[in-house]
Amino acid sequence: MRDDFPDTVSYNRFVELQKKAMPPMVIFLQTCCLGKCSGISFLDSTVIKACHYKREKQNKVFKGIASNERGNMGWLFGFKLHIVISQRGEILDFVITQGNVDDR
């Protein structure tokens, strides 16, 4: 698909650029894309796996950032996404934490 996407970067370059793109994207989402609270809100969290927990020592991308945790669904090496939505399905707030952060 190089004809469709001629300016695509390599995977290694993508990993390097990903760290620079994350802060502006989070700021944009939190300033422009969040909904207004309309009374009832729902809170939940989900895991974002960085890699299989047995390969955590080999992971170089999230070394020192992601963490280990034993949860109700087994071992996790990665992060957790905590999100609050309104009754209309609008995102009110979100935060990404290390995997070992308690859901409460």
Image (cartoon, rainbow, N blue to C red):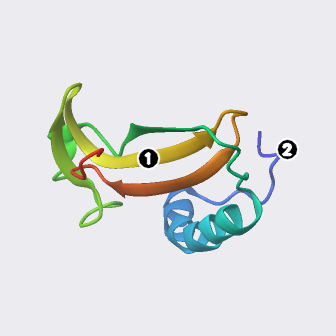
Q: Farthest residue toward the right? A: 4
* Camera-side mark, 1 or 2: 1
Q: Farthest residue toward the front? A: 39
Residue 80: x percent and y percent? 37, 47
Task: Describe residue 104's horizontal placement relative to residue 36 as left or right.
Answer: left
Please tell me whether mark 1 sits on a helix, a strand or a loop. strand
Q: Is residue 26 above or below residue 92?
A: below
Q: Quadrant of residue 38?
A: top right
Circle 1: residue type: Leu
Which mark, residue 1?
none
Q: Quadrant of the N terminus?
A: top right
Q: Give the residue displayed 73% in from the left and 51% down from the top.
A: 35
Q: Is residue 67 above or below residue 54?
A: below
Query: In the rendered image, which residue does mark 1 sit on?
Result: 81
Residue 31: x percent and y percent? 71, 68
Foreground residue among 38 and 75? 38
Q: Mark 2 Cα within 10 Å, few/some/many (few <14, many 20+)?
A: few
Q: Give the residue displayed 16% in from the left and 53% down from the top.
A: 57
Task: Describe residue 81's horizontal placement relative to residue 26 as left or right.
Answer: left
Residue 56: x percent and y percent? 20, 48
Residue 42: x percent and y percent? 53, 36
Q: Mark 1 Cα within 10 Å, few/some/many (few <14, many 20+)?
A: some
Query: In the rendered image, which residue does mark 2 sit on?
Result: 4
Task: Describe residue 69's horizontal placement relative to residue 94 as left or right.
Answer: left
Q: Give the residue displayed 49% in from the left and 62% down from the top.
A: 15
Circle 2: residue type: Asp
Contact? badges 1 and 2 (CB < 8 Å):
no
